[in-house]
Image (cartoon, grey):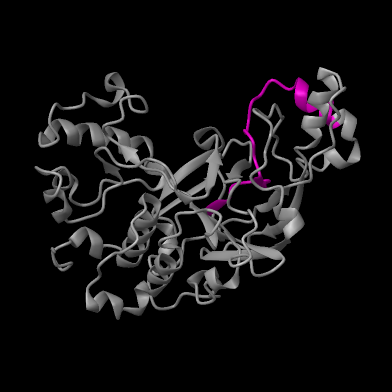
């Protein structure tokens, strides 16, 4: 084991790095992780360890006590589809060829620098010879080689990721564990993100489902003054076998109405915070049962994006099926806003044992670490 005193990239933001390392372990299915005794005694890491302990080993969605998705983006220098060689430079034949890879990484990170991406203070060291040796880099880098580019998740999946959201890096205080990565609405809109839930997750297992409700938690960056809502799919409309194709389309469109469960307006404190809500077992029953192959819905910048469903269902249904813009597929949960907002995680918790009552997102201030972000000024 390499002593962490050597891992200077880790020490650049240890709270971030320990937390996201634990999330990565859960994402890839690692159940047991060895830690140094000094780390286990370090209270700054305890939220990461609690999260790992609560979710490790839950490989069966029916028996799992919780589901989560941690929103992020990774910049993979080996990805020639996202980063074509004629624009970002050629991919070297061997990872150990430093200079060509560094030049390609520099061009990639330049595209995302306004979203916080950086190669760090030791960019060439990140791409040193050998996959293991690059752990000795002196600083963090947001570009890697053959790295995971998506979210870290278990039983919740984001839909149309790149079309509806933007990846960010290094957001907020390094004393809170969440800000190493994040995702926001797209600045130009539409201000909507969709998520699907594994249909097996909420199957009734009495030993796990110990109440008639499910808790939902969302961690957000309190930056700017935008308003946003987290919505859940409403009960589907009844459909009879003798209905016409057009009637079937309209019934499908009606089933895309969503009920708000959390409504919030940011206060621009610059801290990561959380909101929670309790949904009934009946509300949760529709999660994971999205039946629409593609939603053809106009997604504007209005907060009442789905309110029109209740005011004029037939007209709204017709508008949905006639709109050519494919936005979200089979969504069970929607995040809807009226401006820029940043998010870290959505969780569904079947019982309170998986709820962390000591999470730093519950604090009103962070006084023992780096300052929070400056007030947000929209462009």
Q: Give me the residue at 55% from left, 65% from top.
A: 273
| Residue 357, x across and y down, in percent | 54, 76
Q: Is residue 249 left or right of residue 195?
A: right
| Residue 204, x across and y down, in percent | 65, 57
- Where the C terminus falls, by quadrant? top right
State yes or no: residue 197 in magenta: no
Q: Give me the residue at 77% from left, 46% from top.
A: 234
Tell which of 221 and 21 is nearer to you. 21
- Where the N terminus falls, by quadrant? bottom left
Give the quarter of the image for residue 349: bottom right
Q: Give me the residue at 18% from left, 61% from top.
A: 8
Q: Give me the residue at 84% from left, 32% from top.
A: 239
In this rendering, the answer to whether 347 lies above or below 155 is below
Q: Residue furthest front?
A: 206
Tell which of 277 and 162 is nearer to you. 277
Q: Is residue 280 left or right of residue 29?
A: right
| Residue 201, x across and y down, in percent | 58, 52
Q: Is residue 375 left or right of residue 25?
A: right
State yes or no: residue 340 in magenta: yes
Picture mark count: 0
Give the quarter of the image for residue 178: bottom left
Tell which of 342 and 346 is nearer to you. 346
In this rendering, the answer to whether 209 lies above or below 30 is below
Give the quarter of the image for residue 47: bottom left
Part of the protein shown in magenta: 316-343
| Residue 300, x across and y down, in percent | 70, 35
């Amino acid at each position: 084991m390499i002593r962490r005193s050597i891992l200077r990239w880790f020490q650049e933001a240890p709270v971030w790095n320990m937390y996201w390392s634990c999330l990565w372990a859960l994402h890839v299915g690692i159940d047991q992780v060895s830690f140094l005794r000094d780390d286990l005694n370090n209270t700054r890491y305890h939220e990461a360890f609690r999260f790992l302990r609560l979710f490790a080993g839950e490989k069966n969605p029916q028996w799992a006590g919780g589901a989560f998705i941690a929103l992020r983006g990774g910049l993979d220098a080996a990805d020639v589809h996202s980063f074509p060689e004629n624009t970002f430079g050629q991919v070297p034949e061997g990872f150990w060829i430093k200079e060509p890879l560094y030049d390609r990484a520099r061009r990639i990170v330049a595209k995302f620098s306004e979203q916080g991406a950086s190669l760090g203070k030791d960019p060439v060291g990140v791409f040193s010879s050998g996959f293991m040796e690059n752990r000795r880099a002196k600083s963090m880098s947001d570009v890697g080689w053959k790295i995971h580019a998506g979210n870290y998740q278990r039983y919740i999946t984001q839909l149309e990721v790149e079309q509806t959201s933007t990846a960010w890096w290094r957001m907020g205080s390094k004393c809170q564990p969440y800000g190493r990565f994040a995702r926001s609405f797209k600045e130009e809109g539409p201000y909507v993100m969709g998520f699907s839930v594994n249909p097996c997750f909420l199957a009734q297992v009495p030993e796990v489902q110990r109440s008639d409700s499910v808790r939902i938690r969302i961690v957000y960056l309190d930056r700017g003054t935008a308003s946003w809502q987290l919505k859940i799919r409403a009960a589907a409309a009844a459909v009879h076998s003798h209905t016409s194709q057009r009637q079937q389309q309209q019934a499908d469109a009606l089933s895309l109405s969503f009920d708000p469960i959390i409504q919030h307006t940011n206060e621009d404190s610059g801290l990561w915070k959380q909101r929670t809500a309790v949904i009934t077992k009946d509300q949760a029953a529709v999660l994971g049962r999205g039946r629409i192959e593609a939603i053809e819905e106009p997604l504007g910048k209005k907060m009442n994006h789905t309110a029109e469903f209740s005011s004029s269902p037939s007209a709204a249904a017709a508008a949905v099926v006639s709109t050519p813009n494919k936005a979200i597929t089979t969504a069970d949960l929607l995040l809807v806003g009226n401006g820029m907002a940043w998010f870290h995680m959505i969780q569904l918790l079947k019982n309170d044992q998986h709820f962390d009552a000591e999470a730093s997102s519950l604090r009103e201030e962070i006084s023992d670490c780096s300052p929070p972000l400056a007030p947000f000024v929209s462009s």
